[in-house]
Amino acid sequence: MKSIVNIFKSFFGNLNQNSVEGVKLEKGEKIELKIPEAILGNGIWRISEWYVENGDNISPGKVLCKIESENEESNFESFLEGKINYRNTSKNRLDKDSIIAEIVG
């Protein structure tokens, strides 16, 4: 099983590409995590399993959930430090506007 954290890192130039370092959110700051469009081109993806609950504190490198397509599965890791405010519990297909989770500082 591979991780897609490196795909997210490619969108955030301030992250160290050789380690799982992330971003600590300021108090009250919110970020919605969405599946990168680069992944969506590789099939139909769904969230198959969650490893965190709403209200859980997370740190960079924490595996939030498992996503899978017909041919692949991947861990969805956080690159943020904060708290899970929302997690998508739908078993429906993920698209570019699907919010996987919302993290708050």
Image: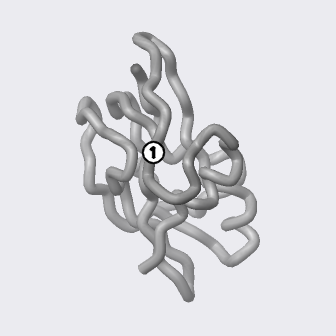
Name the residue type under label 1: Glu
- Counting the numbered discs, the total is 1
- Location of the C terminus by quadrant is top left
* Scheme of colours in the image: one colour
Question: Which residue is located at x 70 percent, y 77 percent?
Answer: 42
Question: Which residue is located at x 47 percent, y 33 percent?
Answer: 102
Q: Is residue 89 left or right of residue 4?
A: left
Q: Is residue 58 left or right of residue 19?
A: left
Q: Is residue 75 above or below residue 50?
A: below
Q: Is residue 74 above or below residue 26?
A: below
The image quadrant of residue 21 is top left
For numbered disc 1, what is the local secondary structure? loop
Q: Position of residue 34 (x, y in %)?
A: 60, 46
Question: Which residue is located at x 61 percent, y 51 percent?
Answer: 9
Question: Which residue is located at x 37 percent, y 58 percent?
Answer: 65
Q: Position of residue 72 (x, y in %)?
A: 53, 83
Q: What residue did someone put label 1 on?
A: 21
- Location of the N terminus by quadrant is bottom left
